[in-house]
Amino acid sequence: MTVVAAEPLYASAHAEQDKSDERVSGTKIVFRQPEGVSVDRTTQLLRCHSIRALLGVVDPLPDDPFSLPGTWVGIRVRPEAGNYAATLQADSAAHNLELVARAKAFAKAKMGRGAPSRVPRTAGE
């Protein structure tokens, strides 16, 4: 897997009247589309890996962003600007922060040569 970018996802939470707080709600990893592998198949492979790691069938890598020990990781993959983007979300802010840290470490190890350091944006975003 050649990673293009990894970044946290944020959600607004209302803290007080007329005030809101930005909180980490997960992470996004953008990677080059694997040749001949559809979005659905990629989603299935990543979800199966996550479940196998959760059940202890496989030993996850230390910075595996697709699994957390003892915690379910929601995974959704979509096409994005000629790449695939995996959205990863856990059940708590602390777990989501851990996912972000793992995603950044994973991206650093898997970053493709010449890949942009940020997720490419399209007009209107």
Image: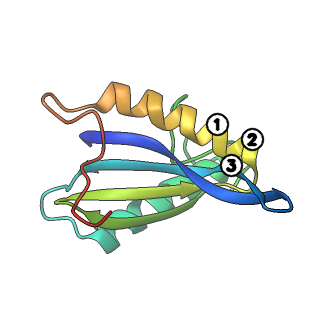
Per the image, the residue denoted by label 2 is 94
Look at label 3 and name its amino acid. Arg
Residues at marks 1 and 3, CA–CA distance in whole angstroms: 13 Å
Which residue occupies 75% across, 41% down?
94
Q: How crowded is the residue under tag 2: few (<14 C-alpha within 10 Å), some, or many (20+)?
A: few
Per the image, the residue denoted by label 1 is 98
**Image vertical order of residue 105 relative to residue 8, above or below:** above
Secondary structure type for disc 2: helix
- Give whichever of 108, 40 is nearer the camera: 108
Q: How crowded is the residue under tag 3: few (<14 C-alpha within 10 Å), some, or many (20+)?
A: some
Q: Is there CB contact under 8 Å for labels 1 and 2?
A: yes
Q: Quarter holding the C terminus? A: bottom left
Secondary structure type for disc 1: helix
Q: Quarter holding the N terminus? A: top left
Which residue occupies 23% across, 70% down?
38
Q: Is residue 51 left or right of residue 12?
A: left
- Give whichever of 93, 68 is nearer the camera: 93
* Residue 42 tag number: none
Look at label 2 and name its amino acid. Ala
Q: What coloring was used for the rendering?
A: rainbow
* Disc number lying in front (3 or 2): 3
Per the image, the residue denoted by label 3 is 23
Which residue occupies 69% across, 42% down?
69
